[in-house]
Amino acid sequence: MNSRKLKIHLFTGFKTGILLLFFIFFMLPIVWVALTSIKRPVEQMAIPPIWFPEQPVFDSYLTLFQNPDFATSLVNSLLISGVATLITIVIGAIAAYSIERFRTGGRMLPNLLLMTRMIPPVVVIVPIFLLAYRVNLLDTYVLLIITYSALNMALIIWLLRSFFAQLPVEMEEAAMIDGCSRIGLFFRIVLPVVMPGIAAAGLICFIFCWNEFLFAVTLTGSHTKTMPVLTSTFVSERGLDRGLMSASGLVSSLPVIVLTIVFQRYLVSGLTQGSVK
């Protein structure tokens, strides 16, 4: 018995150690960026690297907040990511339910949708740019919102389809026997039950839209510049402003971190439900 308890304790300690190593591995770059943002330029370029500054300075944050493009880029990212996520979730939920319950498009449609995620973005970015140029949509909110919605639609449909698959058909049949219409059934019965899954899919979609860089830097200009594009402007022919780039990267990640903390419960329960059949 003592030997068994010892093995259990050793295995638990081993798992804890592995998780701790993963935590350190993923947190180390974030800590380094945060420390770099409050270092002086001499400390940023020091060899060997200096982890902790002798005296923290916040000049990089002051310069960032005084940048006239900062507020505009932050609002642009929030607006574009939020609207694109809303459109993707609404259309994706309806499509996923239709595919799961009515077998719309046949059995191969979900796989074909997922295959679109395997197409490298660089393959489609030139056609999208040329099309947007011809219809005068370059540097507009509409272009990025449509592009982000199209890019994430297949993944969201795939995720939400697994959540709808968990719902027993008998529950829907009972609601329809009681006089509930198909539309009422979807909005009043189905959606509230799978709301954790929808919240998880929405958060994933928002993160993808928020962090997207390739399409943003190609299809936007000064009017619709997003935070990743603004951060990239701190690299120029004169060199790299490490402090300013670190401050910008840290500040731009705060909305995503806050949303993840707020919806963490839905994210964990939603992904857990979607992974179990």
Image (cartoon, rainbow, N blue to C red):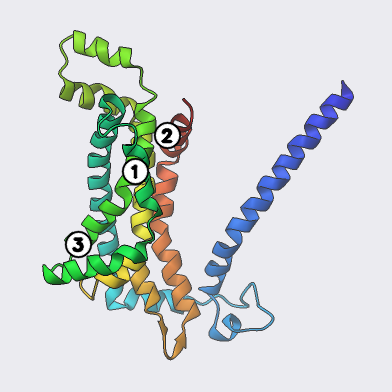
> The residue tagged with tag 1: helix, strand or loop?
helix
> The residue tagged with tag 3: helix, strand or loop?
helix
Residue bearing the label numbered 2: 270
Give the left or right position of residue 50, taking residue 147 as reference: right
Q: Disc 3 marks which amino acid?
A: Leu
CA gap between label 1 and label 2 equals 24 Å
The residue mark sitting in front, 3 or 2, is: 3
Q: Is residue 210 placed above or below 247 in the rendered structure?
A: above
Residue bearing the label numbered 3: 143
CA gap between label 3 and label 1 equals 24 Å
Report x, y in % for residue 48: 69, 81
Instruction: Judge by depth and name the residue closer to the eye, 15 or 243.
Output: 15
Residue bearing the label numbered 1: 112
Residue 244: image tag: none
* Residue at image coords 28%, 56%: 148
Q: Disc 1 marks which amino acid?
A: Leu
Q: Quadrant of the N terminus?
A: top right
CA gap between label 3 and label 2 equals 30 Å
* Residue at image coords 34%, 28%: 164
Extreme-bottom residue of the structure? 238
Give the left or right position of residue 233, taking residue 33 as reference: left
Res. 5 in view: yes
Res. 72 in view: no
The residue mark sitting in front, 3 or 1, is: 1
Report x, y in % for residue 242: 50, 79
**In the picture, residue 15 is in which quadrant?**
top right
